[in-house]
Amino acid sequence: MLNPSHLRTLAEVIETGSFAEAARRLGYTSSAVSQQMAALERTVKAQLFEREAHGIRPSATAEFIAARGADLLVAIEELQEEIASVVAGRAGALRLGSFPTANARVVPLVIANLVRAHPGIEVQLDEGEPERILELLTAGSADVGVVYAYDLVPMTWPVELTPVELLVEDLVLLLPCGYRIQGPIEDVGVLRSEKWISSQADTAGSTCLARLCAARGFEPRIAFRSNDYDVVRGLVAAGVGVAVVPALAHMPDPAVRAQRLVSSPRTRRHVLALHRTANSNPLLGEALRALRQACRKIQEEI
């Protein structure tokens, strides 16, 4: 295999016409240059120089190798610069996975901050619920995953992943505007006769609602299910049911009366960033900083 150092030395020898002058330019000894050219001759299995009384003359093979090798040396230098940029976090790719609600409110801020600080990087985004994000992380298809876990639905993470808490959300009770009960509702038990709007049956949000109601001695009567919080809010606004949603998913609506479930301290939802502990992507630290920064801003809003 060709040695780039030998190609550089060959180019200097041809340009200067002398082993000694090439050695001076490169900071080598004449002996070292001679040894490199001998090694290159063994590699290509051809004589590269004609030894004359007053110097050396490059062979046609040497001229050919030097000409073609110049492009290779430029490519190697460019590769070294690109590698240095990737290692320094000035280039490269970051693969991010997140759940839909965070993609709507948190992730755009994160991507904007990352690209602004590092214009040369590429950010790739995938979307899914925590189960899918975990699959991407453990398969090595994502560098950072944004997931959630309810207090009433505890989660455990694979040992090879490191969790970083980003924000903690209250749950928000949604009622139609003008609901029959006036004032704050401190116990969801008073809503046992209502129709409920919930996320799909196999989700943590649905399980959280069931356990919240079970703690008050009743099973919620689920009339409608949707994982789209805009749909949930629209159904509440239409007066066909009540719902509980995470604060991150709540958007003010004049047709909806919203109230924090502050009387139930263990009904919060935690948003976390997960990454493989062994992940060596130089952009990982930048991504976690951008996530923390965005979530501090969001925490003030929700």
Image (cartoon, rainbow, N blue to C red):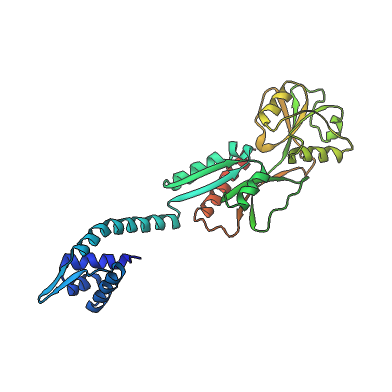
Question: Which x, y percent locates residue 252?
Answer: 66, 29
Instruction: Residue 33: tell me if it is visible.
Output: yes
Residue at 77% in and 45% down: 153
Question: Which x, y percent locates residue 248?
Answer: 65, 38
- Nearer to me, 255 or 87: 87
- Nearer to me, 276 or 186: 276
Quadrant position of residue 219 = top right
Instruction: Residue 110: tell me if it is visible.
Output: no
Question: Which x, y percent locates residue 227?
Answer: 69, 33
- Nearer to me, 181 or 283: 283
Residue placed furthest toward the left: 54
**Please, is residue 124 above or below residue 222 in the view?**
below
Quadrant position of residue 206 = top right
Residue at 54% in and 39% down: 108
**Please, is residue 182 above or below residue 60 in the view?**
above
Residue at 53% in and 50% down: 287
Residue placed furthest toward the front: 45
Question: Which x, y percent locates residue 46?
Answer: 25, 68
